[in-house]
Amino acid sequence: MSNSSSLTQFLLLAFADRRELQLLHFWLFLAISLAALLANGLILSAVACDHHLHTPMGFFLLNLSLTDLGCICTTVPKAMHNSLQNNTTISYMGCAAQVFFFYFFMSAEFSLLTIMCYDRYVAICKPLHYGTLLGSRACAHMAAAAWATAFLHTLLHTANTFSLPLCQGNALGQFFCEIPAIHKLSCSHSGYLREIWLIVVSVCLVFGCFVFIVFSYVQIFRAVLRIPSQQGRHKAFSTCLPHLAVVSLFVRTATFSDLKPSSISSPSLDLVVAILYSVLPPALNPLIYSLRNQELKDALRKMMTGCFLPVCKYPLSCSVLSFRNI
C-alpha cells in the first residue's frame, strides 16, 4: 500500500486461527454484549419510569448507560461478525466510523463520570446547596457540555488520524479500529506531530479531571467519616463506592492501554487490554451500580415484578418531562 488513498479496507486481528476457537469467541462476545444490553436497558427503563430515581444522579446514570450501550454496539458486533464469518476485514469508511463513535462514547463516559463525582461531592459536602447547584437546568447544561466536548475532541482526533498518509500496510493488529494502531501504519512526520499535540491536550484534560475526582473524593470521605450515625455513613458510602469503582476500572484499563511500555507489548497482551477497557466496563458498570445502589435495586425489583403504577407507556419521554422537576 503506497498511501492511504489506495486503501479500501483494513485487516483486523483474528482472535484465533482454529475455527472452534473463533466460534467460542463469538459466543463469549455474544453473551457479554447481551448482558450489557440487558443490564443497561434495565437501568434506562428503571431511571425513566421510577420517580424516585428522577434525581441528578439518576439523570447522569441514564446518560452513562447510553454511553455504555454505544461502546458495546460500536466494537463488538463487527468482532462477532468476523469471528462467525472467519473474516478479518473492515472497510476504510467503516473503520473511520468505528473510530469516531468509539472514542466519542468513551470521551463522553469519562466526562460524565467526572460530573457524577461533582454530584456526589455536592450531595455530601454541600447538601444545603444541592438543589441550587444541581437543578434541572444545571444538569442539562453539564450533560450537554459533556456530549459536546466529547464530539469536538473525537472529531479532531478522527480527522487528523484519517488525514495521515499510510504506507505501512493495512494490518491493524487489533480486533477493532483504534487510533494508536492506525498511527503505526503512518509515514507522515508532520501528521504525527499534530497528533502528539492533540494527545498532549487530551492528557492534560484527562489529568485535570482525574485530579478533580481525587480531590473531590478526599473531601467526600472526610465528610462521611464525620457523620455520627452508622446508617448515615453506610448510605453515603453506598452511593459513592459504585462511582469510585467504575472510575477506577475505566481509568486504569484505558491508561494502561495508552501508556504501557513497548517492551512488554505483544498481540495477545494488546488484545486482552483492549477487551478490558472497551468491552468489560460497559458490561460491568450496570452490575456495579445495581449492587450498591439501594434505590436502583428497589426500582429494578419493582420493574421486574410489574409493580409500577401507573405504567410508563413512553419511558424516555416521561423521563425528560420528569427531570424538569429535579
Image (cartoon, grey):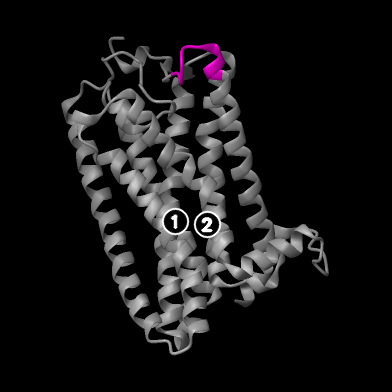
Where residue 167 sits: x, y (%)? 26, 15
Q: Which mark is residue 288?
A: 2
Q: Nearer the viewer, residue 242 or 69?
A: 242
Residue 275 lies left or right of residue 81; in this view the side is left
User: What is the secondary structure assignment of the residue under circle 2?
Assistant: helix
Q: Is residue 95 visible?
A: yes
Residue 252 lies left or right of residue 50; in this view the side is left
Instruction: Let me know if residue 263 is in the magenta part.
Output: no
Q: Which mark is residue 246?
A: 1
Where residue 26 sits: x, y (%)? 57, 25
- Residue type (three-letter) at the residue carrying disc 2: Ile
Q: Where's the N terminus, which quadrant? A: top left
Residue drawn where x is 53% and y is 68% of the image: 57
Residue drawn where x is 76% and y is 58% of the image: 304
Mark 1: few/some/many CA within 10 Å (<14, 14-19, 20+) = some
Where residue 216 sits: x, y (%)? 33, 72
Instruction: Let me know if residue 19 is in the magenta part.
Output: yes
- Residue type (three-letter) at the residue carrying disc 1: Val
Q: Nearer the viewer, residue 186 or 76?
A: 76
User: What is the secondary structure assignment of the residue under circle 1?
Assistant: helix
Q: Nearer the viewer, residue 229 or 57?
A: 229
Marks 2 and 1: CB-CB under 8 Å? Answer: yes
Q: Earlier in the sequence, mark 2 or mark 1?
A: 1
Mark 2: few/some/many CA within 10 Å (<14, 14-19, 20+) = some
Magenta residues span 14-22
Where residue 289 sits: x, y (%)? 54, 60
Q: CA distance from mark 2 to mark 1?
A: 7 Å
Residue 40 vs 186, above or below: the answer is below
**Image quadrant where residue 286 sits:** bottom right
